[in-house]
Image (spheres, grey):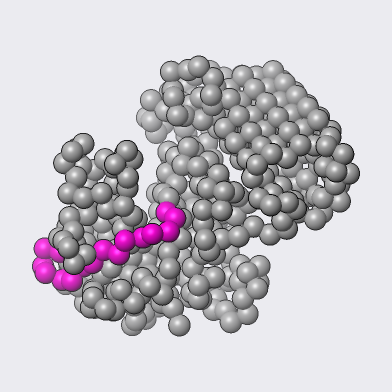
Amino acid sequence: MFPPVIATVGGGGTRLYPLTLDQPKPLVDLCDTAIIATLFRVLANQGCRRFILGSKGADNTLPLNNYFKAGEGFFKRLGISDIEEFSYQPQYEDRGSADSLRYCASYFDIAEDALVVSGDNVIDINLRNFIDFHKDKGAVLTVALKELGPDEEISQYGVADIDADHRINGFVEKPAPGKEPSRMINTAFYLFSPEVRDVLAEMGDSARDIGGDLIPYLTEHGYPVYGYPVEGYWIDIGTPERLLLAAMDFLGGKVEHYAFRNEYRPGQWVNPRTLDRIGRYLDSGDIELIGNVFIGRNCNIEKGVVIENSHIGHTSLIERGSKIRNSMVMSFAHIKRGAVLKRTIVGRHSTIGPKCVLDADQSCCKPGKIPVVGENVTLPQESVVGPGTRVAPLKYSYKILATGKFSQLGTDDQNIYFCEK
């Protein structure tokens, strides 16, 4: 039996605005599945059955409870019959991830090893090897570490100071360029031994954050903390660009323990209910699918549509002549005639007007940034949305600007257009 999983869920997810204006970050869609459910699928498919949502506040707990309920539907979709009910952290004044671990371990009487995961990361890890490594080392804590390549940005992560035996001496948070002790970063995927309950009791009120408080305490007091190098896929989904990258990686088959269903052609998946609607156009070439493409259930797609390396959520409408490339279109979207989407995200229940252009590759001052249309947006016809521009319903203007992280670019009768400062 694999260890229970405690998912620490908190924070407002402002960097993912507008996709998190009305829902917590872990429930943002990644290929028609909430980010956190995608992670849970990877774990459940390898044997995890007990899931505890250590969520903070009503804004996180209530939507998560509505999404998963007791977990029966989650396990049923995976074809798993030996199930345990999902559990949720009771209402209390949660002071951080370490405090949540302490509370949940006590409340649910976890007297065994426990996996502690972040609700906004996706990791594809061989759990059996990870657990065996932890036991062989006699670790109080084993941290899954991911080695970044020499050209990858490392300054935004906690970087491990690690010896030849994989023992962690500490982490350097967000090191300056050239000051990092290694290229191994903290993935926020942990395996704790039961002894951690005693450690948390020792720490008392000072145990708030796992990365900021608990891990430094363990290393400074000589507890065995080890780092396990992750060979499989890992990504933290903190920005729209990372969300889109994750979607493209999933379509590209980079996640070993995650698979799409209903393969229509190699690398292309079309739900049977949608295929009943559009199959004749696919056969005649009136709809063109290029590269890796997923199309969900109950979609309607008209003639002249081109979809390339993109994910289309369920119950979406795509009108004639539209071109969608390297993009993620979430469920219930309506893409009207002649629209062009290039490297962009369209949120749920949004309408993209006729001949609109959403293009991350336009010449612009924000290289690498993508256009993002939030949920329930109606974009006027012939709108042009370039790199880094985000669109949300006008009613969210105050909430967006009050963060101090965004600049307003303009408004129309229905929407606010904004970008990161």
Q: Is residue 146 magenta?
A: no
Nearest the camera: 95 or 68?
68
Q: Residue at x 22, y 47 (%)?
A: 173
Horizontal relation, residue 293 to residue 37: left or right? right
Residue 114 in view of the camera: no
- Furthest-front residue in this view: 266
Provide the residue span drawn in magenta: 219-234
- Which residue is depicted at the point 51% across and 53% down? 254
**Residue 237 in sight here:** yes
Q: Is residue 202 left or right of residue 186?
A: left
> Percent x, y for residue 317?
77, 39
Position of 349 relative to 384 (above/below): below
**How many marks are shown on the rendered structure?**
0
Residues 184 and 11: in front is: 184
> Image quarter for residue 382?
top right
Front one among 331 and 152: 152
- Is residue 221 covered in magenta? yes
Question: Which residue is pictured at 29% across the width and 79% down the height?
Answer: 135
State the quadrant of the C terminus. top left
> Quick check: 6 above or below 290?
below
Foreground residue, 228 or 387? Answer: 228
Name the residue located 17 percent from the left edge and 63 percent from the top edge: 164
Q: Residue 187 at what x, y percent from top left?
A: 34, 55
| Quadrant containing the N terminus in the rendered view | bottom left
The part of the image, by quadrant, that contains residue 346 is top right
Q: Residue furthest left?
A: 221
Q: Is residue 174 above or below residue 112?
A: above
Q: Position of residue 41 (x, y in %)?
A: 54, 64
